[in-house]
Amino acid sequence: MTKQGFIIALAVAISGLFFLGASPLFTVDITQNAIVVQLGKPVRNITEPGLYVKVPFIQEVTYFDKRLLDYDSDAQDVITQDKKTLLLDNYAKWRIVDPLKVYQNFQTQRGALQRLNDIIYSELRVELGRHDLLEIVADHRADLMKIVTQRSHEKASAYGIEIQDVRIKRADLPEQNEKAVFARMQAERERQAKQYRAEGAEEAQKIRSEAEKDREIILAQAYKESEELRGAGDAKAFKVYADAYRQDVHFFEFTRSMEAYKKTCKDKSTLVMSPDSEFFRYLKQR
């Protein structure tokens, strides 16, 4: 066979391979790693992008994504330390760092993802089972997720997988437990409301009692001061009367009698007295 004939035959053979879908050429994208498998055994681990050659019908290529991947699981039940069932929906960020190990253990990326789900759920169940519900949903969630991430990464690294972060996307109570929880919450709020009302009534009674005591003290003090002032006024009046009496006895008696007439003989007053009474002495004088 001439050289030209050989080239033609080679071209025809290659064209036939392409036609049969058994191209000896394959490409590796910049976002991919590739494992060349020959008769079920990996023979090449390709980590750089480019155009490569394989043996048709004998060698196959399995691709693995080298980018940071998302893992989003379905919601699953987790039982806390205080025996509460929590419906947990979590996600993770992970990467294939050793495609050869991944192929040897799982053959495909889908198989690796299934194993990743088992590892993360197992660590979540173990770690969250050591804490109460309130700690998980409120107090220490970030710290718990760091522990779960670290332990999950330690297990997954044996399979050529790196787990960078595990997070809780949503944590709910199962539907059958929601009513019981809401009932307990309502009872607790009612208990607190009754306690606050009782404390308020007690405080109001204290305030009223204190105000009543202050009122009595103020009235007593005012009465004391008024009596002292009245007594002082009466004493001064008596002194004035005494001085006036000493100066002119008859005028004093006359003045006092006029005041008595004025107070006694008001409009529509009726007096039943003897005409010779001493009370009318100044009225009878001429």
Image: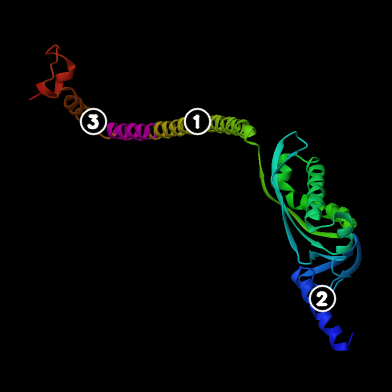
- Residue 232 pos. (x, y %): 39, 34
> Which is more toward the observer, 138 or 58?
58
Dot 1 falls on a residue whose secondary structure is helix
Q: How far apart are marks 2 and 3 (CA)?
A: 159 Å
Marks 1/2 in contact by CB < 8 Å: the verdict is: no
Residue 213 marker:
1
Residue 49 in view (yes/no): no
- Residue 92 pos. (x, y %): 74, 56
User: Looking at the picture, does residue 274 appear above or below residue 135?
Assistant: above
* Residue that badge 2 annotates: 13
What's the residue type where badge 3 is placed? Phe
Q: Residues within 10 Å of mark 2 (few under 14, many from 20)?
A: few
| Left or right placement of residue 75 versus residue 120 in this view | left
* Residue that badge 3 annotates: 252
User: Looking at the picture, does residue 272 appear above or below residue 6?
Assistant: above
Q: What stretch is highlighted in magenta?
A: 230-246
> Which is more toward the observer, 191 or 156?
156
Q: How far apart are marks 1 and 2 (CA)?
A: 116 Å
Q: Residues within 10 Å of mark 3 (few under 14, many from 20)?
A: some
- Residue 152 pos. (x, y %): 83, 52
Which quadrant is the N terminus positioned in? bottom right
Q: Does residue 237 belong to the magenta stretch? A: yes
What's the residue type where badge 2 is placed? Ala
Marks 2/3 in contact by CB < 8 Å: the verdict is: no
